[in-house]
Image: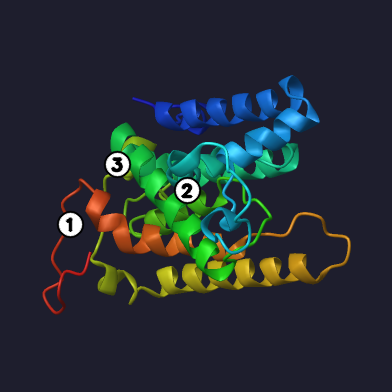
Amino acid sequence: MLDQPSSQRILNVPPVVLVLLVLLGLVHAFLYLALTPEQTTDFLLLFAFIPARYDPSVTSDIVWPGGWAADVWTFVTYAMIHANLTHLFFNALWLLAFGSPVAWRFGAVRFLAFMAVTAAAGAAVHLITHFGQLLPVIGASAAISGAMAAAARFAFQHGGPLAPWRNPKEASQVPAPPLLASLRDPRVLVFLLAWFGSNLLFGLWSSAVPGFDQAVAWEAHIGGFLAGLLLFGAFDPVPRPQDAGAPDLQ
């Protein structure tokens, strides 16, 4: 029997990823087509992540919309908002590329919980590094960074998602080694160095270039990535082989 055409494999995307892509598109369309500028500001105050919300000394006279509940949900809801079509487009591409194998592996519920946790971790790191800042943070990049880290935990294994001949869903189920064993894999180390290096360079460059109106929240990316790397084992349902020479650090 002949294998499925490659075009069918390209379109073989987990339903939960497709749902997320549709939601991101709908939120963006609602924000930029249905709201006035004043309503857009109110929307951002309610759903974007703003470090100043958590520093009473900066805005003690401001009543933030949503109250304490928004203090909690904005750790996640900011990831559903994007600055423009370019921002949305590139995040959608990265979500397709790295979110798909993780979604096939985790299943819909685990995947959504994982993305929420890594988004929150990115917001938390941004809060620590930008405490009191009024500039809102938006975009799914921190959560997608977490998916990149999770994919790195198993994608380089034999027969994994990088194998072009395998069904994507089946390829995502290859056993993942423990974290310490993964960090001894030169391919994983190269990926980590390239990821951290590119994020640091691009983040610092965007902050230094005059007239660049959208600074990159690279600290949030790092927070999401580290959360994805370290918490992968807490979400992974696939049994993994034990490394006989090292403890099983998930």
Residue drawn 58% across the image and 43% down it: 64
Residue drawn 38% across the image and 60% down it: 227
- State the residue position of label 1: 240
- State the residue position of label 3: 106
Neighbourhood count class around disc 3 (C-alpha, 10 Å): few under 14, some 14–19, many 20 upward = many
Q: Secondary structure at mark 3?
A: helix
N-terminal of the pair, mark 1 or mark 2, is 2
Q: Nearer the viewer, residue 94 or 58?
A: 58
- State the residue position of label 2: 75
Q: Secondary structure at mark 1?
A: loop
Q: Nearer the viewer, residue 146 or 245?
A: 146
Q: Secondary structure at mark 2?
A: helix
N-terminal of the pair, mark 1 or mark 3, is 3
Separation of residues labelled 1 and 2 (CA atoms)? 31 Å
What is the x, y in percent for residue 18? Answer: 49, 28
Left or right placement of residue 179 versus residue 164 in this view: left
State whether residue 230 appears in this view. Answer: yes
Q: Nearer the viewer, residue 189 or 226?
A: 226
What is the x, y in percent for residue 55? Answer: 55, 61
Left or right placement of residue 232 versus residue 189 in this view: left
N-terminal of the pair, mark 2 or mark 3, is 2
